[in-house]
Amino acid sequence: MDARVESGQSDLVRMMVHYMGWANRVMLAAAAELPPEEIVRKRATLFGNIVHTFNHILVIDDVFRCHLERRPHGYAARNTETSPPFDEVRRRLEDMDRFYIEMADNLSVGELNEEIAFEYIGGGDGRLTRQEILLHLANHSTYHRGFIADMFWQIPFRAAANDLSVFLRDAWPHLRR
């Protein structure tokens, strides 16, 4: 199957990267409403708590940013052993989302189709196009926001909806150029 972007498809990549940033902001804002002890409370989940799950999203975004910039990332694992404070993770993840949004808004179709060679943290060679990396990151963050939503329900706390359909209705019409 040919995964190259055709001229009209670049809008889909751009939309998904904008969605990633918007949905991350929704969930980060919700987490900021919680008492600080709830953000770090140990829970039966993959990364142990809310902030460490956000930190994992940030680490993977940073790893792939380094791949895209063709420089070493320095990570030995898919998350750091401990997380920085929530406010720092929030700021860095919002900055990272802005980086990816700007990138997606400015890449040509040819650049989206460019293959990037890298080594996976767990070992093995990887080779993805810029488009595939951006779509992977959008999908990856969605997956882990689901874990965060589950932790919110355990508190119990209800965050605003961050579904793609809500983004398409409420945010995307204002972000299109």
Image (tube, rainbow, N blue to C red):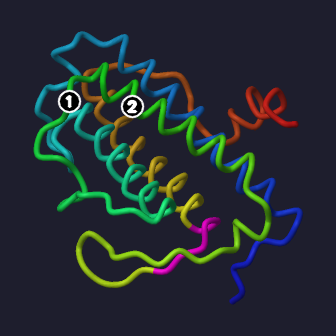
142 sits left or right of 82 in the view: right
Name the residue carrying label 2.
92
Looking at the image, residue 30 lies above or below residue 9: above
134 sits left or right of 10 in the view: left
Labels 2 and 1: the sequence-earlier one: 1
Name the residue carrying label 1.
84
Q: Secondary structure at mark 2?
A: helix
Q: Residue type at mark 2? A: Arg
Residue visible at 51% across and 62% down in the picture: 68
Give me the C-alpha separation between circle 2 and circle 1: 10 Å
159 part of magenta stretch: no
Q: Which mark is residue 170?
A: none
130 part of magenta stretch: yes
Residue visible at 75% across and 37% down in the picture: 168
The image quadrant that residue 28 belongs to is top left
Q: In this view, which residue lies farthest toward the bottom? A: 1
Residue visible at 56% across and 40% down in the picture: 99
Nearer to the camera, 49 or 135:
135
The reply to whether the C-beta atoms of the residues labelled 2 and 1 are less than 8 Å apart is yes
Nearer to the camera, 87 or 117:
117
Q: Secondary structure at mark 1?
A: loop
Pinpoint residue 56: horizontal percent, then vertical percent: 29, 46
Pinpoint residue 32: horizontal percent, then vertical percent: 36, 15
> How packed is label 2: few (under 14 Cα within 10 Å), some, or many (20 or more)?
some
Q: Which quadrant does the C terminus fall into?
A: top right
Nearer to the camera, 6 or 63:
63
Q: Which residues are magenta?
A: 127-132
Pinpoint residue 41: horizontal percent, then vertical percent: 13, 26
Looking at the image, residue 92 lies above or below residue 164: above
Number of residue marks: 2
Residue visible at 32% across and 48% down in the picture: 59
Q: Residue type at mark 1? A: Pro
